[in-house]
Amino acid sequence: MVNTTSKTEKWNKARKIHQELHGQRAKQKTLALALSVLLTSVYTTGAAAQELSIPCDEAEEKALAEAKANEVTRISAFKPATPLERVDPIYPSLAARKGREGWVRLSYVIDEEGRVKDPVVEDFFGSSSFKRSALSAVKKWQYDPAIKDGEPTQQCHQAVQMDFSMGGKTGATRKFIKAYKNVDEIFKAGNVEAADEAFKELSSWDTLNRYENTWLLSLESQIAGAQGDIEREAKSLSRLLSSNGQKRFNNAVFDDDYVAYVLQRKILLDAQRGYYAEALKSYSKLQEMHEQQPRIEEVAAIVNRIETSIASEKNLEVPASMGENGRWFHTLVRNKFAFNNIQGELDTVEVRCDSHREKFTVAEAHVWHIPQTWGQCQVMVKGDDATTFDLIEVAGVPQ
């Protein structure tokens, strides 16, 4: 269970931090990307993006850890692709002049020649021009290709977040603070729908910086929670984490205690939605926060139920809606899946795994079987933006 009293206390604490920091926004004369790289849990400053995952190494490490001491198990030799050239995204001039900040999260494939293929935007926040700039940049990246059993091979399910931020200290402008307090007061008065309308008007401003984005997303999550909209609440919390910055780079908007609450809440919401891989990912991050042991213990029972469900003989049903961009992403926890109850049109489903990918048309009666050797997989479904359906993770041997 989520500790609602703790939520209120942390929100009040975060508000005090906000009031202390809102005057720190400096004049922004120099444009710069907030540059950081995350490559298999190692950070290096000075690059233009955060590498979010290279899961092939993790798969091999897990296999090695599970092998018995007196047993020889063959593991396919896999050498991940390594970057040769990365072109920094261009900061869109209009967004820069207005002080607009944000980020873009993409996934892509590295082909046998080390080229980036089929990049797609999974999510973004800020100016839509950031998406165009990020896509243009990543298409020019070049890698030494991944090597499997001595031969060049595709590396799939690659993810990156590109952060667009201005140089100098940031805080909230007086204009933003006044508008934000107005929305917050309407919400606290219990008029949730009016607060949502005021929130949407504020979030449409084209001058919002990363600090303001993060506070807005926190407020949106509260509004969505009051409306009982778990899809929107989960998405706003995920975006909050992407916008928040990082403690190690001394640019985090919210402190560890609030971040831990967000992770805890997200585990609960993702468990309810059937997004089990996302819930387990959040739990892993929470476990790394050793001072948050009480929160870890509070969600341990939920995680145990998730793991029991994955290992069970019952099908796992994930209700889905395509949304505005006509794409839907889901990370699988099993190696068989199917579609059911399709209301509308679905065009294609692309399966992107650690070391393999395939694209198919969609048939409701078909069950896709993914070889265990492909590793963990993500599905990307394309179709009409109003389409709804159920993705069924079919009972069987889990990944």
Image (cartoon, grey):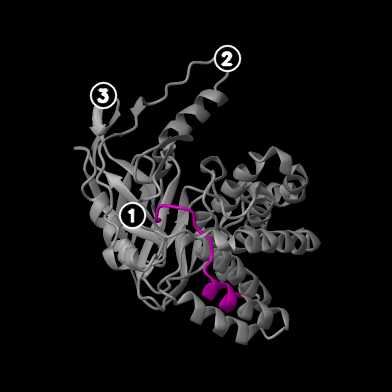
Mark 1 or mark 2, which has the lower sequence index? 1
Mark 3 or mark 1, which has the lower sequence index? 1
Within 10 Å of the Cα at label 2, are there few (<14), some (14-19), or many (20+) other Cα atoms?
A: few
Q: Position of residue 72 (x, y in %)?
A: 48, 16
Judge whether residue 98 can be spotted in this image. yes
* Cα distance in 3D space between marks 1 and 2: 54 Å
Q: Position of residue 131 (x, y in %)?
A: 32, 62
- Type of amino acid under label 3: Gly
- Can you tell which mark lies on residue 150? 3
Residue beneath disc 1: 31
Q: Picture quarter containing residue 374? A: top left
Nearer to us: label 3 or label 1: 1
Segment tinted magenta in the rendering: 165-180
Q: Position of residue 344 (x, y in %)?
A: 39, 78
Nearer to us: label 3 or label 2: 3
Judge whether residue 318 can be spotted in this image. no
- Can you tell which mark lies on residue 69? 2
**Looking at this view, is 398 or 221 the one in front?**
221
Q: 139 above or below 202? A: above
Image-based side of 118 in relation to 370, left or right? left
Q: 187 above or below 45? A: below
Verify CB contact (< 8 Å) between mark 3 and mark 1. Answer: no
178 part of magenta stretch: yes
Identify the residue at horizontal 41%, vertical 62% (top origin).
Answer: 101
344 part of magenta stretch: no
**Looking at this view, is 345 or 223 the one in front?**
223
User: Which quadrant would the N terminus be assigned to in this image?
Assistant: bottom right
Within 10 Å of the Cα at label 1, are there few (<14), some (14-19), or many (20+) other Cα atoms?
A: some
Q: Element at badge 1?
A: loop
Q: Position of residue 53 (x, y in %)?
A: 43, 42
